[in-house]
Amino acid sequence: MSKKELLSGNEAIARGAWEAGVKVATAYPGTPSTEILENVAKYEEIYAEWSTNEKVAFEVALGAAIAGARSMTSMKHVGLNVAADPLFTSSYTGINAGFVIVTCDDPGMHSSQNEQDNRRYAKFAKLPLIEPSDSQEAKDFLKEAFKISEMFDTPVLFRMTTRLSHTKTVVELGEREEVPIKDYVKDFRKYVILPSNAKVRHYVVEERLKKLQEFASQTSLNRIEEGDPSLGIVTSGISYQYAKEVFPNATFLKLGMSFPFPVELFKKFANMVKRIIVIEENEPFLEEEIKILGYTDVEGKKYIPLCDELSPDVVRKGVLGSELPHPEPLKSVARPPVFCPGCPHTGIFYNLWRLKATVTGDIGCYTLGALPPYESIDTTICMGAGITNAFGFELARGKEFSKKLFGVIGDSTFLHTGIPGLIDIVYNKGITKIIILDNRITAMTGHQDHPGTGRTAKGEPTKEIDIKEIVKACGVEKVYEVDPHKLRETREVMKEVMELNEPAVIISERPCALLPEERKKQANRPKRKVNSDICKGEKCMGCIKVGCPAISMKDGKAYISELLCVGCDLCVQVCPFGAIS
Amino acid sequence: MEEVFNVIIAGVGGQGILTASELLAKVAMEVGLDAKKSEVHGMSQRGGSVVSHVRFGKKVYSPLIEKGACDVILSFEKAEGLRWVHYLKKEGGKVVLNDLEIIPTTVSLKLDTYPLNIEEQIREKTKAELIVIPATELAKQAGDARTANTVLLGAISNFLPFEEKIWEKVISESVKRETVEVNLKAFYLGKNYCKK
């Protein structure tokens, strides 16, 4: 019997890449996709890199595929927006060795800024779309995806969702199949996408789509599961599992390759059943394909909500209008994510709150600066926008307003897409002030290295990119470095910078409090204690405003949890009565 | 096992919930059952609510447990247990609560209140059997406060169809070698506490 393991969807993709003979894998971290590359990096046979951003990741992997190595790139759904430029053109060039793009969508937005359904990218860019329904399929279908890629000379879009990426299911493992590097033959008409070549390639793409459409009805990735003919369900991805849970006896058209739509297979299925319901998460992607064929009585979004993620409950309620009997919900307490004890961001946002600054934010743990007690962030849009949005504020509201305006951005995010925005401010004579929150790691996704950390995805030492030198090279002359846990000093620098009539950057230098080296330091520091005789309690609340989760109010006085305190002195610095030591 | 068995493990980010749910799913897999466990990583790690769904049986489809289908809720923190009681089967089920309250910042900021009389509420509003267990105390007895999650697994093992030797095997293979002994001790302290 072959070996079985409990693997998350992301771990299964990594395993699938290994078994498929992948040679090059690239990614930029982003929930729920991050663990794919983390696990790929453990295989000696595969080159794995954290790329600077998703566009870079995509292009590096595509280059490797054109040059003859099976390659894979993975990213979260909004990451594919960053890589959309090469995505569309790679559809025209095609590949040489297999090339698979893994997109991890986030229905329900557990850790994302929007709920875009990247299946639409497959149709938009005219690429085949693969959708597994559990970890076993994630591994097996990935291997199929490489075959399809090479069979049809096309990149393949492989779509995961949060519940697939982060659910562990039983997987039967296979062995690695070594795929030799393919010959590379220079092909000007294929890989140099001049208009004259692109015109020809567009016809090739349309022809390929027709062939893929025929293939979709023949591949074992798509199947009919015969059951009760009174109800036929069309579904794909995780929605299949929810539909099976609620309608175990129905007849299913289960799609593992959902674009191009398997027209012939669907017609066969439609002849077998009396009523058809499409059960899919978010967009009516399959439903539209079916309705275009003229099957206008097929139902889907009439019952299944378009917003938010699905669950068996939602499917049951949507289609049957009922739910299982259950006890009434009881009111618990809101427990939103918070900055960790000792977090470097705490100092910055405490000061931004004190200064009542307007703050354009970015993507990272520090987005929490928008929540109480700071409530200091005004905008959060996407990677890099902390810098560019701030400049837009300056243009709209003038230089006087801009004195109390800061754009904040993390270290990994600055290297990702922050640099062009900073150059834009300098080039276009802005005075916008930027704070780079350098905590020496990509923190929110669980500590991935980046070009500024001096370590590769494989943990090897490498050249450390110097953020300060980059800032200077962008033309910023006023660059300051602060320790964000020195509250008064940091605030003085902020005030000084606010008076400047030119762009300036403050680099907040302090490592993430969860890094192993930091934890060692914390273990040797004494925990902070409140002298309740001196503490003014609820009349003051000064220490609560630091936003440290170790501090709470107990019996009308401040209380520091010994379990959570890491011995930093932010609370000591802010207590006006010296009650904390 | 024809019927699928459903367990919700809840708590606050950093308490070892994912390790516990992984162990449980591995135990089910060890006896040849289909098993799935689902949770969300990312923002929720940072001191926020964490919940993991573990399902096992002959064949498991949905990784998510439906409201009204949960057999056992294991909560590492009291208010987090309260949060999921409506997932219990209407008639019955078990709730195992760690005797621990973690007050969120929202309460200190007076934006919310911590629920009162959690045990009474659960007894009154559900038909589940409620067990409250001082897991941290028992973990300290075992020799390491960090084994509270193993104590809690021991507690719910009384309600699950797996033999002790399977638990021992999976725990021994999953935790760091030097902590096997203390974890096994913690497991049995939890198991025996609930038998009383």
Image (cartoon, coloured by chain):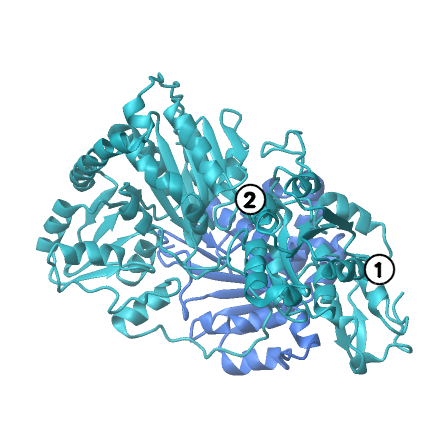
Q: Is residue B83 above or below residue B150?
A: below
Residue at the location (35% across, 64% down)? A312
Label 2 Cα crowd, 10 Å radius (few <14 / some 14-19 / many 20+) = many
Depth order, front residue of A115/A555: A115
Residue occupied by mark 1? A527
Amino acid type shown at disc 1: Lys
Q: Calculate the distance from the C-alpha at mark 1 to the C-alpha at mark 2.
A: 37 Å
Nearer the observer: mark 1 or 2; the answer is: 2
Q: x, y percentage for residue B130? A: 57, 73
Amino acid type shown at disc 2: His
Q: x, y percentage for residue A284? A: 27, 59
Depth order, front residue of A411/A149: A411
Determine the chain carrying the residue at label 2.
Answer: A
Residue A2 picture quarter: top left
Quarter of the image with the C terminus of chain B in it:
bottom right
In this view of the protein, can residue A255 be seen by the observer?
yes
Residue at the location (31% across, 22% down)? A188
Residue A385 picture quarter: bottom right
Residue B13 picture quarter: bottom right
Q: x, y percentage for residue A547? A: 71, 67
Q: Is residue A286 above or below residue A541?
A: above
- Name which of mark 1 and mark 2 comes first in the sequence: 2
Colour in which chain B is drawn:
blue
Residue occupied by mark 2? A416
Residue at the location (42% across, 50% down)? A77
**Numbered label attached to residue A247:** none
Determine the chain carrying the residue at label 1.
Answer: A
Where disc 1 sits, the SS reads loop
Depth order, front residue of A208/A224: A208
- The chain letter corresponding to cyan is A
